[in-house]
Amino acid sequence: RADEALVTGSGMAALAVAMLAYLQAGDRLLVSSRLYGRSLVLFEQEAARLGVTCGVVDTCDLAATAAALSENAKMLVVETITNPMLRVTDVAALAQLCHDAGAALLVDNTFASPAVCRPLELGAALVMESVTKIINGHSDVMLGMLCGGAAQPWEHIRQVASTWGFMASPFDCWLASRGLQTLQLRAEAACRGAAAVAEFLADRKEIAAVHYPYLATHPDHPLARRQFGALGGSMVTIELASDPAEAARAATVERFILAAAEQGIPFCPSLGEIQTTLSHPASTSHRGHTAVELEQLGIRSTTIRLSIGIEPADQVQTALSNALAGPGL
């Protein structure tokens, strides 16, 4: 449980507050190479304008992260479950590395939510939640939250949020308090559905790969089981099978997105709603990445991210099956 928390106007606002409250000109920041695209823009480009240098490291590589932290880093920023390839961060191991290096660990816990993982209990200094997503759950607010232990500089954090205008809308806060009442129920239903959908899609010939932390084929499967317990998250990422020609891949993706919408699974770059939705990372969350950067992250033009809702799993499976059975898929 957090000792203190601050609600902001968005998840990005919460990250900006942390950056502005903790860092100043001459400081060095370290971030995971697997962060959400806009988070990377904030820490790599906007921080540079303030005289803060930013290093990027694959935080799935603990040895490389330890070496990077030793270069006088003041803060490390990671995601519990990465967007969109769903790699799992070893929060406890990174928290120890940060402690040894004298750095603060900031964890973006949006894809997990407190229902799946509580990074403060694993040693993180700060946790950011995009309340817009699973915590609210009803796709009708935009909020973020920064929380942590009493030892953090909360007076300064609040001053930064107020002075820079990052505060939240009272009405959105009221709506989010409604969503909090059903968070555990919604998260459990969505996570169970995601596990069933991942298993189902793994056997489809139209799917080249399925990424889900609780699949035995996932590279972080043992870590996910140890760190998360009963729930593996509500996100499932897939690679559509397609002819290797770029035009053919684009056509396959377009046909699938349109067919899924007809089956009640709409395109939505956000996530965590009560309804199952899908997104195309290469053209949304990671559209600012170069082709080389996308390849390094494993994101392809045929990558589709599914946010599983609270519908019965067989209903979602039927919808996806019908969408995959469409012409050209």
Image (cartoon, rainbow, N blue to C red):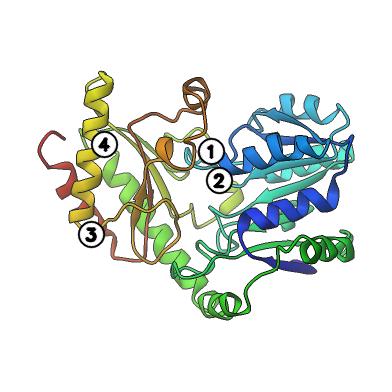
At label 1, the amino acid type is Arg
The residue to which callout 3 is attached is: 264
**Label whose residue precedes the other's in the sequence (1 or 4):** 1
**Label whose residue precedes the other's in the sequence (4 or 2):** 2
**In front: 264, or 236?**
264
Which label lies toward us, 1 or 3?
3
User: How far apart are the two marked residues, 1 and 3, measured between alpha carbons?
Assistant: 28 Å
Q: Position of residue 23 (x, y in %)?
A: 85, 45
The residue to which callout 2 is attached is: 81
User: How far apart are the two marked residues, 4 and 3, measured between alpha carbons?
Assistant: 17 Å
| Labels 1 & 2 near each other (Cβ < 8 A) | yes
Which label lies toward us, 4 or 2?
4
Q: Element under label 2?
A: loop
Q: Element under label 3?
A: loop
The residue to which callout 1 is attached is: 87
Label 4 Cα neighbours within 10 Å, binned few <14 / some 14-19 / many ≥20: many
- Label disc, if present, on residue 253 of the rendered structure: 4
**Label whose residue precedes the other's in the sequence (4 or 3):** 4
At label 4, the amino acid type is Val
- Residue 90 seen anywhere in this rendered image of the structure: no
66 versus 133 height, above or below: above
At label 3, the amino acid type is Gly
